[in-house]
Amino acid sequence: MTVDAKHAIHTGGPAKTAWQRGRLLALGSVAVAALLVAHDLVPNRWGNLGSLVQTFLPWLGLAVPLGILAALLRRSALAILAVLLPLAAWIWVFLPQLRPVVPEPGDLTVVQHNVSDTNTEVAGTAEVLLAAEPDVVTLTEVSDATAEKYTRAFGDVLPHHETQGTVGVWSRYPLKGATAVDIRPEGIDASWDRCLRVVIQRDGAPVALFAAHLPSVRLGSGGFQTELRNTSALQLADAVNAERHDTVIVSGDLNGVLADGAMAPLTNLVTAPATGFELTYPEVFPVAQIDHVLARGATVTEVRALGRTGSDHLPLVAHVDTPWS
């Protein structure tokens, strides 16, 4: 006796066909496709749902293999056909980032790394960063003690440096105008000091560099908690917008992905490479790129993640085409 016949006896009616089974699976595929295409329409209510969806947007592609597996187990032709919708939507959204492009080399190499305040492997971390042959390195989560160690480790390669609170900049070129930038959300203690502005001096036009570390986000019972980060991002955007130099680089741990609409006040002012998935956190199994090098009045031609260090983040190296070139 066939499975369909057994089903008919058990239910007292004719068995469903392959085009009638799996309607809920098909509906799920339609919902995922809609999220992919219209993610920017998801409201930031109900625990910042919009930011949560946009942060993990590429991972919605997992609905395709999972949907195919479920459709095969359900023996549903309808569900298998419906899986084509999220597949097409994922390709449509992310194809520009996947297209092979030969990037311009740029004339300024910037490395950004959240080195972690528990990282004791300073020499090893510096070795990984220097292997990228940087012109500028921005670090977050550095203390006074570790900043001195990184200065010694970078040596004559990056002889110019400035620190402010828990962020620092080390450079091949002279730095001037080091200034603390207040991006502290209201209610946060004054000891919270996470943004530094410097001007990189080289023949040609100077470049203003903001090294920043925005507040962390949390996923808990109250939803996706991004309010402090959003406030800090708005203050950083105000500082970038007020910057008098034409060329600006923003480098740091922004604790957010560029697709997150809540970051728009900042991301509307700067640009990033249009290709690639360079995930930086957590380092064991990266799921999101929250470390960034962005620019105004210059072009970030390429970013890529570097190897693991003693931190819970991966370093990021960016090639920037500035007016110097």
Image (tube, rainbow, N blue to C red):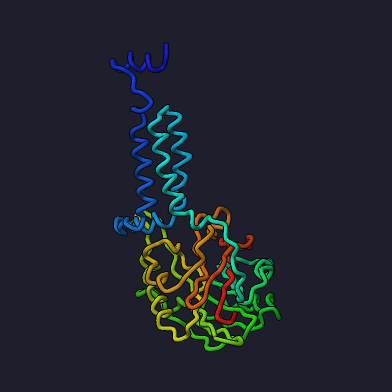
Q: Residue at x 34, y 23 (%)?
A: 16
**311 or 285, which is in the foreground?**
285
* As drawn, 206 above or below 83: below
Q: Is residue 33 left or right of residue 59?
A: left
Residue 117 in view in this figure: no
Q: Quadrant of residue 131?
A: bottom right
Looking at the picture, does residue 157 appear above or below residue 98? Answer: below
Relative side of 168 to 86, left or right: right
Q: Vertical placement of 168 versus 52: above or below?
A: below
User: Which quadrant is home to the N terminus?
Assistant: top left
Q: What residue is shown at x 44% (from left), y 68% (from top)?
A: 215
Lateral position of residue 38 relative to residue 68, left or right: left
In the picture as drawn, the residue positioned furthest to the right comes out as 156
Q: Position of residue 240 (x, y in %)?
A: 43, 79
Inspect this view and state whether residue 178 appears: yes
Question: How many numbered badges does the structure rendering display?
Answer: 0
Please tell me which residue lies in front, 106 or 126: 106
Between 169 and 108, which is closer to the camera in this rendering? 108
> Residue 77 is drawn in which quadrant?
top left
| Rendered location of residue 67, percent (x, y) | 43, 38
